[in-house]
Image (cartoon, rainbow, N blue to C red):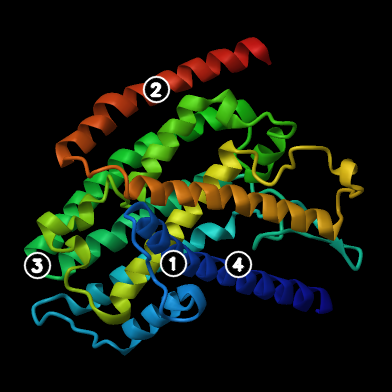
Amino acid sequence: METFLYILLMFVIKIAIVLAIAFTAAASAVFAERKVAAYIQCRIGPNRVGPKGLLQPFADVLKLIMKEDIVPYEANKVFHKIGPMITLTVAFAIYAVIPFGDFFYLNGEKVYLGIATSPNINIGVLFILAMTGLNIYGVTLSGWSSNNKYSLLGGVRSSAQMVSYEIVMGLALVGVILITGSFGLTDIVNHQDNWKWNLFLNPIGFLLYLTASFAETNRTPFDFPECEQELVNGFNTEYSGMKFGIFYLAEYINVFTVSLIMSLLYLGGWTLPFPSEWIGLEAGSFWLSLIQLVVLLVKTSLLVFFFFWVRWTIPRFKYNQLMDLGWKVFLPLGLLNIILTAIGVYCFK
């Protein structure tokens, strides 16, 4: 009984820590993007609320909470409420299989940085793909249930876009699985030790996954489901208050999530650029795990910055260009990458 309560307590603490990291990352990303955009456009950006404008994200959340929740009279009330819930739930569910570092010892027990109590869930990559696919339902249901033609068109665009680029994303991940020989994220990270990053071993796969991530998160230049010039605001046109805020929050959590996954899959994850013995730390040390977490978050933050940078420097594509790029360029390139990777693995292993 005591063992069960201990495991349950650790599980709850881990969930609370991961949720706190995700919410903090989303709030920080909102502030950081506004500052990056201001810098690129020679503006100041948020600088009124709190020191240097650091409290601006909290002011935005407070404003959304206080705004009226308006539901169209002809909307499907049930699905109108469910849509944002699906989007946010899926955004958080992915963290169930994401490891944040290696284990460390606490009172003689192994503790792993992540929600899972296992060091390596052998279906981690498949779970991520499954959760990514479920995200379509939240956006599509929200657009359809609003009974608004702009929202409906945004939902249809989103479903076509996400399905197309999920195929590309899946093909990119096949190369990583072939090289590593495992679906487990911890195995994939450990395989990249000593600078054997999949970015160097499988650069085409990294390019495919990076581009597909922009489409999956509806980020510029692939933000067609919420294209303001054409669709007012797309699938979330008829949402206000905190429901709109949930979509906004989920977008930034997804940006952080895909950047975190790319760090694990292609950039060596939490592996250090030098042997841990150089700094006098052994495997299982709490301080080594903390340093590994910092290394992973630095890599993730650089990728998040890249998402911001692209948004404010590259104009939006046309929708037919987006679909042509996915089906006529990236799909054949993804299949070719699998063939070349399989040949390389067979010849050099």
If the image is split into quadrants, where does the C terminus sit?
A: top right
| Label 3 – label 2 distance at C-alpha | 39 Å
Residue 32 visible to the viewer = yes
Q: Quadrant of residue 335?
A: top left
Tell me which label, 4 or 3, sits earlier in the chain.
4
If the image is split into quadrants, where does the N terminus sit?
A: bottom right
The residue singled out by tag 1 in the image is 31
Q: Amino acid at mark 2?
A: Leu
Q: 100 and 137: which one is in front?
A: 100
Q: Secondary structure at mark 2?
A: helix
| Label 4 – label 3 distance at C-alpha | 36 Å
Where's residue 345, x and y in %? 61, 17
Q: Quadrant of residue 196?
A: top right
Q: Amino acid at mark 3?
A: Asn
The residue singled out by tag 2 in the image is 335
Tag of residue 105: none
Location of residue 100 with respect to 192 vertically, above or below: below
Tell me which label, 2 or 4, sits earlier in the chain.
4
Q: Amino acid at mark 4?
A: Val
Where's residue 3, x and y in %? 82, 73
Location of residue 69 with respect to 155 vertically, above or below: below
Q: Residues within 10 Å of mark 3 (few under 14, many from 20)?
A: some
Where's residue 40, x and y in %? 36, 52
Are the residues at dot 4 and dot 3 in contact (C-beta closer than 8 Å)?
Answer: no
Tell me which label, 3 or 2, sits earlier in the chain.
3
Tell me which label, 4 or 1, sits earlier in the chain.
4
Relative side of 86 to 68, left or right: right
Q: Secondary structure at mark 1?
A: helix
The residue singled out by tag 3 in the image is 148
Q: Residues within 10 Å of mark 2 (few under 14, many from 20)?
A: some
The residue singled out by tag 4 in the image is 18
Q: Residues within 10 Å of mark 4 (few under 14, many from 20)?
A: many
